[in-house]
Image (cartoon, rainbow, N blue to C red):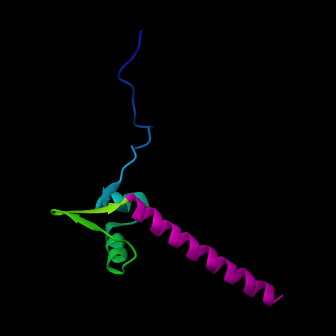
């Protein structure tokens, strides 16, 4: 007999084009306050749809890509400094 009531809590969320602020902060694993700081600093672009504030998934991906590039550059500078002082 087939069971149609399968628990889907382990299933990944469906692909989405945009998130509300709370959801975007959760996706980035940061607080809503930190999210708004990033918006104010121009690090993340948000869109208004009526009274709702949304952020595109691609904007979150781009922010993470910039964050990763900065971390890699900092690690390279640190490694170069260590090599210089040996």
User: What secondary structure characterizes most of the magenta part?
Assistant: helix
Quadrant in which residue 75 is drawn: bottom right
In-image side of 10 versus 70 (left or right) = left
Q: Residue 41: percent from the left, percent from the top?
A: 36, 81
| Quarter of the image with the C terminus in it | bottom right
Residue 28 covered by magenta stretch:
no
- Residue found at the very far bottom of the displayed protein: 85
For the question of whether residue 6 can be seen, the reply is yes
- Kindly identify the residue that appears in the image at 41 percent across and 57 percent down: 27
Q: Going 30% across and 68% down the picture, which residue do you hit?
A: 46
Quarter of the figure with the N terminus: top left
Number of marks: 0
In the image, which residues are magenta?
A: 57-86
> In the rendered image, which quarter is residue 39 located in?
bottom left
Q: Is 30 on the left or on the right of 65, as rendered?
A: left
Residue 20 found in image quarter: bottom left
Above or below 16: residue 86 = below
x and y, in percent, of residue 36 in the image: 31, 73
Q: In this view, does 57 lie above or below 67?
A: above
Relative side of 51 to 40, left or right: left
Residue drawn 32% across and 63% down? 55
Please determine whether, in this image, residue 37 is positioned above or below residue 57. Answer: below
Residue at the spot x=34%, y=77% of the render? 37
State the residue lying farthest toward the top: 1
Nearer-the-camera pick, 45 or 77:
45
In this view, which residue lies farthest toward the left?
51
Instruction: Report x, y in % for residue 45.
Output: 34, 71
Q: Is residue 29 visible?
A: no
Q: Nearer the viewer, residue 31 or 67?
A: 67
Horizontally, is 64 left or right of 8 in the view? right
Q: Does the magenta stretch include residue 82?
A: yes
């Amino acid at each position: 007999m087939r069971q149609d009531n399968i628990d889907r809590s382990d299933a990944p969320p469906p692909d989405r084009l945009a998130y509300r602020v709370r959801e975007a902060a959760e996706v980035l694993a940061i607080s809503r306050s930190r999210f708004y700081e990033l918006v104010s600093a121009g690090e993340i672009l948000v869109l208004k749809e009526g009274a709702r504030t949304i952020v595109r998934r691609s904007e979150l991906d781009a922010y993470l890509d910039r964050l990763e590039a900065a971390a890699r550059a900092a690690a390279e500078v640190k490694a170069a400094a260590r090599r210089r002082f040996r």
